[in-house]
Image (cartoon, rainbow, N blue to C red):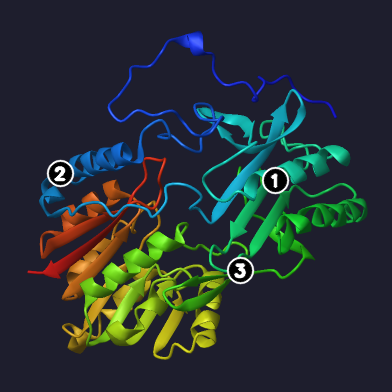
Amino acid sequence: MNLPEMPDASIPPSADAGAAPVLPGATAPRCRHFGWCGGCARQDQTYEAQLDRKMEELRTVLGPYADVLEPIVPSPSPWYYRNKMECAFGFDRDGVALGLRRKGRFYGVVTLEECFLMSEAVAPILAAARGWATAHALPPYHLRRHEGLLRYVTVREGKRTGQRLVILVTAPPTDEAAFTVALEDLGTRLKPLGVTSLLWSVTDRQADLAVGEIRRTVLGEPWFEERLSGCTFRLSPYAFFQPHVEMAERLADRARMMLGTGWPVLLDLYCGVGGLSLGLTGCAERIIGVELEAAAVADATANAARNGRSGVQFLAEDSLVFLRRFSNLSFMADKWAVLLDPPRAGMHPKMAAQLLRTAPPVMVYVSCNPKKLAEDLGQLSRDYRLETAIPFDFFPQTPHVEVLARLVRR
């Protein structure tokens, strides 16, 4: 295999590069890759210091709305909490690299020999996949030259079911028959490591994304299961699900309290696979979940039936388009509540104005991007009062935080 010259990703930055100042709450990083792996940015701080820093940052971001900010809800454990990781193939001096992107280097990959974000099983799975690639002389995909084969290994885990699904993402192989034989060997290597499903996914896109067309189920079933809020969710390979199931359940409990009960209708906009909707059935006589991604709606509908959740309907539609139609039901104006859980990019720019026109009595907003939440509050505060905002630490060792907010119509 002809590999380009790359810095050795097995050697951390030199200690003589200049010592950083010691900050309050500083601690020795647990992981040997800290400082050059892009996965954890704050592992050199105690968990208590991380929480304090997130609260300070939230107060700054939320500005005039920070006076209703409640204390952050900590994670039960700051380690091994994630249920999904997307690991990239790349190059190092030993041959094939497989792990996370190097900090500040889009094209660099750090081969993970250990990782404390998801599961103790991740490092052995990545080592097995890397060994398999080397044994079969399979080249990584080169992002600048747009040549090569191996692109990503995605690991998804049901924390409460023990099921592990692995997706191998590649470019189209030149000899699919030979590659299919090699895939069987990968399944043989991964099965003893607790992998219950192995899928092969293919993409010919140049964009650096860990998704493709599922070409083959090599091992097990093309799905995995997880349990949340008393429901068992069967999830398709690329279905979005909250990355921290324990914290998602705590957030759902608080959302249920914020919504209360007795609503004729609850709208769950940007509902995904219904991870929140199916746990909130006691809040309303009818729940309507709206999600643009058709595959997620199919998962949500099947999971509602599988868990015996009646009175829940899921629609594959743009949330803004749906809300414009729903707003015509003016006789329902005081009889329904809204749950918002937009993606990190935030709501459509016109969504806040549409919510003001629709004017539900109560809105509960789940945000993984506090900056976007503050922008939306700036518009919604015309007619709504932010009653409370509760941060949840879904992402220990990183700067990210989830915020749950309750807005009441003035």
Residue at image position (87%, 47%) is 174
Give amino acid for label 3: Ser
Closer to us: mark 3 or mark 1?
1
Residue at the location (46% across, 68% down)?
272
Instruction: Answer with the quarter of the image where residue 238 lies.
Output: bottom right
Q: Earlier in the sequence, mark 3 or mark 2?
A: 2
Q: Name the residue under label 3.
A: 236
Q: In this view, does 18 lie above or below 81?
A: above
Classify mark 2: helix, strand or loop.
helix
| Relative horizontal placement of residue 67, taking residue 136 as reference (left or right) | left
- Location of mark 1 (residue): 124
Q: Left or right of 138: which side holds 41?
A: left
Local packing at callout 3 (Cα closer than 10 Å; few below 14, some 14-19, many 20+) is some
Label 1 vs label 2: CA separation? 45 Å
Task: Look at 37% across and 81% down and name the residue there.
Answer: 288
User: In this orientation, which residue lies closer to the viewer: 400 or 326?
Assistant: 400
* In the displayed structure image, the side of residue 238 where residue 141 appears, left or right: right
Which label was assigned to residue 63? 2
Disc on res. 172:
none
Quarter occupied by the C terminus: bottom left
Whether pointer 3 and pointer 2 mark residues with C-beta atoms closer than 8 Å, the reply is: no
Q: Which is more N-terminal, label 2 or label 1?
A: 2
